[in-house]
Image (cartoon, helix red, strand yellow):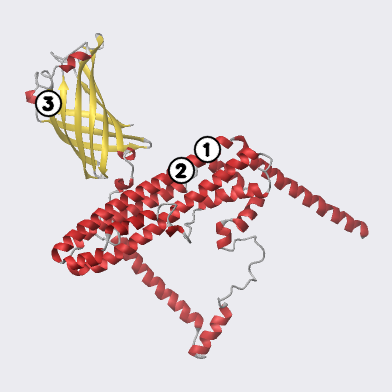
Amino acid sequence: MLILSRIALTAVIVLSLTQGFAQRQDADGLYAKVYRLPDKLFGAIHKNSLSLQQKLESSTQKYLDKLERRERKLQRRLARKDSAAAAEIFGNLDKTYSELSDRISDSSKHNQGLRHTYSPRLDSMKSVFGFLQANQLLSQEPAAQEKLQGALKDYAQLQQKFSQSEALRKSITARKEYLAQRLEPFGMAKSFNKYKAQIYYYRQQMDEYKNILEQPEKLQAKLLSAASHLPAFQSFFNRYSQLGQLFRLPNVGDMASVDIPGLQTRDLLMRELGQRFGAGFSPNQSIGQGVLDAAAQGEQLKKKINELGANGADLDMPDFKKNEERIKTFAQRLELGTNLQSTKSNNFFPNITDVSLSLGYKASQNAVAGLGLGYRLGLGRDIRHIRLTHEGVNFRSFVDIKMKGSFWITGGGELNYRSSFKDFSILQDLSPWQKSTLVGITKKYQLKKMKGNIQILYDFLHRQQVPVTQPVVFRVGYML
């Protein structure tokens, strides 16, 4: 019996040492992933953090400027009706918006006691680096330790910036509700909707930045994936992460038997309800009926919300149609495309392929305007007489307006140089250039990752061309 006990004790010790060695080996593997690419990993963290902070601050200031201009217009409009009310309701706008601008700066006194906005990605990355520090895996490399401290500082500053923007958004929402209540008696709903629209776009812009924040870069994703498979890290995350400190996550001691001060147990609640409403009262039945009633009301509310929020409408403005392009950067609203158009040979021209590049700007989901440059390549009379020549160039302007589904109305003007030339310097002579006015239909389509369009256009000035050109133009386009 004594021999068996010793064998069991030895097995437990060996198992513990093996498990500890395995965890240490896994942690060392995680450290190796960080140590192999320190410059790329920490450099990307610093660059992305700084870029996102600058975008948050610049976008916030831009929308604050727009809101201030809207308020001044509202103030002037109200002053024509009641100057005393305008002065009392709006107050000192310079001071108001100066204080709001301060809330997005690090030096602002409003940042004291600021409630942090939770970010799963930031929490996970800080926990990974904290795990490496706790296991003393970076103490042997001062350079890596310094970079890690810099990354933690970047994350802290980024989280603070998001917390500031969230607090500012709440302040702006509170001011919107205040102005809505005070301006209602003066019949300024239509003018005030433009103010609310700016707040809506600011909220959407901040949500877009949050989505960017929660999408880790490639190296960070690999690091998080490697750490998530470590039991030791999982235990560390459950205990020391922001989420673990906020909630009682599994594997953090025996939490089932812990009573939370100030909260009643289920038994005490049922006993108190029975004493209050009498012996014939059934708490379970009443609570169940209440849950059913609440569920029915919830379904009605959900249906109402869906009706109000249909077609991109804001619940605060049921008739408001949002423009998704408003929250995108200028570069994101650009569309680069190409068009191909072929013309058969005739007495004046050889076979011609017209190739053009276009750059469009999306004013909204339903409107695109842009410019293009085309080049006419001559291919010869037929397959037996192939000859590459310069047969012309053209400059284009276009406007696409969505009609229905994937069909768009397209219109535009063109300047065409239709004469053959050998030297591009001859294009400086403006007399040979001819005008075209095109209107027609564009069918846009998407096949997997390829986007394209088919255009059928009518040239209203085709009879004025010398020689007369074809009235109907057929083009095939692709988005780059």
Going by the picture, which residue comes out furthest to the top?
385
Q: Please tell me which residue lies in front, 182 or 90.
A: 90
Classify mark 1: helix, strand or loop: helix
Decide which of tag 3 and tag 2 comes sooner along the chain: 2
Residues at marks 3 and 2, CA–CA distance in whole angstroms: 49 Å
Going by the picture, which residue comes out furthest to the left?
464
Classify mark 2: helix, strand or loop: helix
Residue with the mark numbered 2: 50
x then y, percent, for residue 37: 58, 35
Query: In this image, 253 relative to 190: left or right?
Result: right
Image quarter in which the C terminus is found: top left
Figure quadrant of residue 372: top left
> Could you classify mark 3 by the number of other residues whose Cα lies within 10 Å: few (under 14), some (14-19), or many (20 or more)?
some
Q: Nearer the viewer, mark 3 or mark 2?
A: 2
Residues at marks 1 and 3, CA–CA distance in whole angstroms: 53 Å
Figure quadrant of residue 308: bottom left
Pointers 1 and 3 in contact (C-beta within 8 Å): no
> In the rendered image, is residue 370 in sight?
yes
In the rendered structure, find residue 435 and report the number of the disc placed on it.
3
Say which amino acid is labelled 3: Lys
Say which amino acid is labelled 2: Leu
Residue with the mark numbered 1: 43
Q: Please tell me which residue lies in front, 149 or 336.
A: 149
Classify mark 3: helix, strand or loop: strand
Going by the picture, which residue comes out furthest to the right?
2
Q: Please tell me which residue lies in front, 208 or 74.
A: 74
Query: In this image, 87 relative to 18: left or right?
Result: left
